[in-house]
Amino acid sequence: MKLFKSAALVFCILCFVFPAHHALASPARDQLQTTIDKLLEILKDPSLKGEEHTEQRRDALRKVIRERFSQTKMAQLTLGRHWRKRTREEKKQFAELFGKLLEKTYISKVEAYTDEKVVFVKEFVKKRKAQIYTKVVTDTVEIPIDYRMFRKKDGTWMVYDIVIEGVSLVGNYRSQFDQSLQKGSYEDLVRDLKTK
């Protein structure tokens, strides 16, 4: 859990910063950049600044994040082999709980936005999958952050995993959830997610 929290912290603070423009970008990268730009607009909006506007600001951030990040796909991948055993209602509930966990973990960190620079390094697109390689550049460090995306039938590209300095967010959660399910029941895992 500690590894995830530090990775999430880096992701949250750094993934929502202004990216460098690239003229020959793929639709996957263009859509990711559009999302980042929208988040920046919210964070820079004077009418949403301050403690008195926290809920309004966070609601706006959540809406944009949910448009680009597939909570259902991420939830499915984190449960791995255990996903198939779940009923339709359980899958829906788990995706909602997992989405809330992600938001709770990092949305407050996004608000600590500073002016780091995101450089798009390269991208690989093959049919309905893409991986966008970026690095976040500060005065003292460069942090690689890669986005794994899939294309829906309507052409929308969705993020289903983030890899920060070689650590997969989904892989990290899958390992944690698998250990929990080996020690206890699915109901115990759901209870844990609700308390988090």
Image: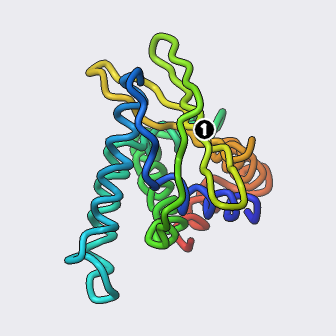
Looking at the image, which is closer to me, 69 or 86? Answer: 69
Looking at the image, which is closer to me, 49 or 9? Answer: 49
Position of the N terminus by quadrant: bottom right
Which residue carries the number 1 mark? Answer: 146
The image shows residue 106, relative to residue 123, as above or below, that is below
Looking at the image, which is closer to me, 33 or 75? Answer: 33
> For this view, does 119 lie left or right of residue 50?
right
Q: Residue at x 37, y 42 (%)?
A: 68
Q: Residue at x 29, y 67 (%)?
A: 59
The image shows residue 102, relative to residue 158, as above or below, that is below
Assign a secondary structure to mark 1.
strand
| Image quadrant in which you'd find residue 2 | bottom right
The image shows residue 108, relative to residue 28, as above or below, that is below
Residue 78 in view: no
Looking at the image, which is closer to me, 192 or 148? Answer: 148
> Colour scheme of this structure image?
rainbow
Position of the C terminus by quadrant: bottom right
Q: Residue at x 36, y 31 (%)?
A: 30
Q: Dot 1: few (<14), some (14–19), or many (≥20) neighbours within 10 Å?
A: many
> For this view, does 127 lie left or right of residue 3?
left
The kind of residue tagged 1 is Asp
The image shows residue 131, relative to residue 179, as above or below, that is above
> For this view, does 44 lie left or right of residue 196?
left
Which percent across, then down, holds residue 32?
40, 38
Q: In the displayed image of the protein, which residue is found farthest to the bottom? A: 52
Q: In the displayed image of the protein, which residue is found farthest to the front? A: 139
Which percent across, then down, holds residue 13?
54, 63
Which percent across, then down, holds residue 190?
56, 60
